[in-house]
Amino acid sequence: MVEITAGRGNPDLKIMDHIPKLGWSNGEEDTPIGAMLGCYMVGWRHGLLQEVAKARAVGVNSIVLFPKVYEALKNPTGDEAYNNNGLVARTIRLLKDKYPDLIIYIDVALDPYSSDGQDGIVREDAM
């Protein structure tokens, strides 16, 4: 949302109007995203916590998370999405333990967990 301040020609963008979108993985280290120069898949403990701390330091208390799970954990039905000890559940617990008031939005499509890359479960008769 952009709030236009009366009497000025430029929009007054407030820092609270920006929510960081963070890709993160099971890895401990940040990994460059080849197709996105200067962008990284942050590690689930250190890099992610650092990025959230930076956002909170400037008044942003919401984040959007996009998971990247190991290929070996993917299958046709995206079972890793429901794993209580998987990347998403562990990460949310980690963030909520450190920042109980943090607002977390997360991508709920199955494509990060699906071995065929689909957002849903593919069957012979339907998707």
Image (cartoon, rainbow, N blue to C red):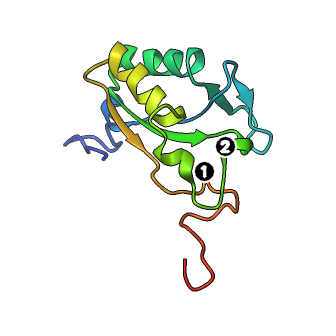
Q: Residue furthest right?
A: 34
x and y percentages locating residue 76 in the rendered image: 64, 61
Pointer 2 with pointer 1, Cβ within 8 A? yes
Numbered circles on residues, count: 2
Q: Residue furthest left?
A: 6
Q: Residue at x 27, y 20 (%)?
A: 100
x and y percentages locating residue 27 in the rendered image: 68, 25
Q: Residue furthest bottom?
A: 125
x and y percentages locating residue 48 in the rendered image: 54, 22
Which element is circle 1 on? loop
Q: Amino acid at mark 1?
A: Tyr
Q: Residue at x 57, y 24 (%)?
A: 44
Disc number for residue 113: 1
Q: Is residue 38 left or right of residue 56?
A: right
Q: Amino acid at mark 2?
A: Leu
Image quarter of residue 122: bottom right
Residue designated by label 2: 73
Mark toward the viewer: 2 or 1: 2
Q: Residue at x 30, y 47 (%)?
A: 1
Q: CA distance from mark 2 to mark 1?
A: 7 Å
In which quadrant of the rendered image does the C terminus lie? bottom right
Q: Is residue 9 above or below residue 98?
A: below
Residue 90 in view here: yes
Image quarter of residue 102: top left
Which element is circle 2 on? helix
Q: Is residue 43 above or below residue 11?
A: above
Earlier along the polypeptide chain: callout 2 or callout 1?
2
Of 19 and 121, the residue lying toward us = 121
Of 124 and 108, the residue lying toward us = 124
x and y percentages locating residue 24 in the rendered image: 59, 32
